[in-house]
Image: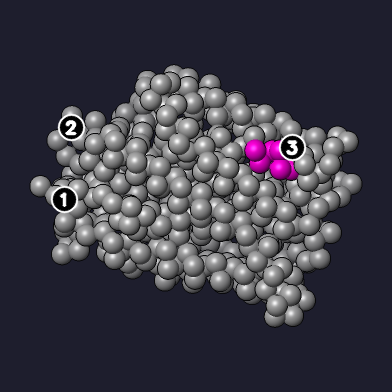
Amino acid sequence: MSETFKGTAKLLGYGVGMAGWSIMINMVSVMLIYFYIPPTNSGMTALIPQISMFGIITLFSLILASGRLFDAITDPLIAWFSDRLESRWGRRIPFLFISIIPSGIFCVLLFHPMHNFESSQNYTWLFFTQLGLYLFLTIYIVPYNALMPELAKNKEEKLTLSVVLSFTFVIGIIIASQIPLLASLLGNFFLISDIKGQFRLAIIVIVVIAGILMFIPVIVVNEKRYCDGKPTKINLFKSLKTALSSKQFLIFIIADSSFFITLAIISSGLLYYVKVLLELPERLGSYFLSIMILLSLAFYPLVVKLVKKTGKKKLIIISFMMFAIMFFSVMFMGKIDVNPRLFLYSLAIIAAFPVAVLGIFPYTIIAEISDEVSEKKSYKIEGMFFAVRAFANKVGQTLGVMAFAILTLFGKDPGNDFGIRLSAFLGMIICLFAAMAFYSYRE
């Protein structure tokens, strides 16, 4: 029987790994589109030509999608290898260890294309560096998440660890969102006038921080001491089929991936909403995300109390409805006679509660479903459940980024902003769809 994994230091030691990979993922969501196809009033030049097919699908969006198609293969494979691995260090930790440095290198390379001017050759660079980044992040994320139900052995422990993971994930969002602010500070300190150069330096600093955070669980988590999981011998397709056979899991995946679509739309569009619609400095985008996330953390104790009275289902549906209201408001940015900063920060307040709810519960829900299926089937495939969720999240994030990239064709500049406003309408529709989908979930 394994030891109980408890204590603030141990829980945070495991949780900060989530903050590390959250930084990497959200850095791409926040910066990639803005970096490669910035608005005309940003002071930066575009790095790729806007090549479209059928007048709506852009080559940029297809390249972004290619990374997730690649994940369709790597996610279940890594999960299967992880569930089956036998080593002196356990099933998961070896994967974490080998992935940290390569993922950091590819994340930096993603923002250092072949040419510092508009060139079709930069598409090739973007394609291969993106694949490298997503491969090594998958090697880290899938085994990392699979540790959760092994470390937390009952409902109380699962809820506690879910709160920790949600907390560290949003901390990762906060850190990733500080790139515009950090770029400005570093530019002033080192007298760097080139805005892209400022961004690149800030990205390198943030990636180093992410790598350090991702390494900490390798030291803190002793699988042989804290985990009971035994390597499973079932084949890949049976493992995947077992995970997908749970109706409740599929309902959850639909709602969860919808949340990540909307989160990607917010992340990709934020700098445009701030710079184009409100005509404010980009650094205020960092303030928006910081207020939203910090306030969401303040809601954590309330959410933990409410779930004991109402259950998860009602809170999740309410959260999607609140997100829909926020997106509806974005459509009118710059059109209403309200102080633009007040408007921006009001939306951060509206979004804070949903971020808390939708951040805490997914890990608990998956762990409970995984345990239920494991009891019925008499074999453990935690890795596969979290791999399916990881893949669905990546698909959601990519669809959100793709959708925003496509909508920029319809206007992304001052005086020509229809595409940006349309992204907010799309976000609202997706939130309403997710709320309806989750209504059929059985608590």
**Label 3 CA crowd tier, 10 Å (few <14, some 14–19, many 20+):** many
**Label 1 CA crowd tier, 10 Å (few <14, some 14–19, many 20+):** few
* Between 124 and 210, the one nearer to me in the picture: 210
> Is residue 347 located in the magenta-colored stretch of the structure?
yes
- Residue at point 61%, 32% (across, down): 323
* Between 365 and 357, the one nearer to me in the picture: 357
Sequence-wise, the earlier of marks 3 and 1 is: 1
> Is residue 312 located in the magenta-colored stretch of the structure?
no
> Magenta segment, which residues?
344-349
Q: How is the image coloured?
A: one colour
Indicate the secondary structure of the residue bearing disc 3. helix
Q: Residue furthest left?
A: 1
* Between 84 and 298, the one nearer to me in the picture: 298
Q: CA gap, disc 1 to disc 2?
A: 21 Å
Q: CA gap, disc 3 to disc 1?
A: 49 Å
Q: Horizontal and vertical percent for residue 394?
A: 49, 47
In the picture of the structure, the residue carrying the numbered disc 2 is 375
Indicate the secondary structure of the residue bearing disc 1. loop
In the picture of the structure, the residue carrying the numbered disc 3 is 330
Indicate the secondary structure of the residue bearing disc 2. helix
Name the mark on residue 293.
none
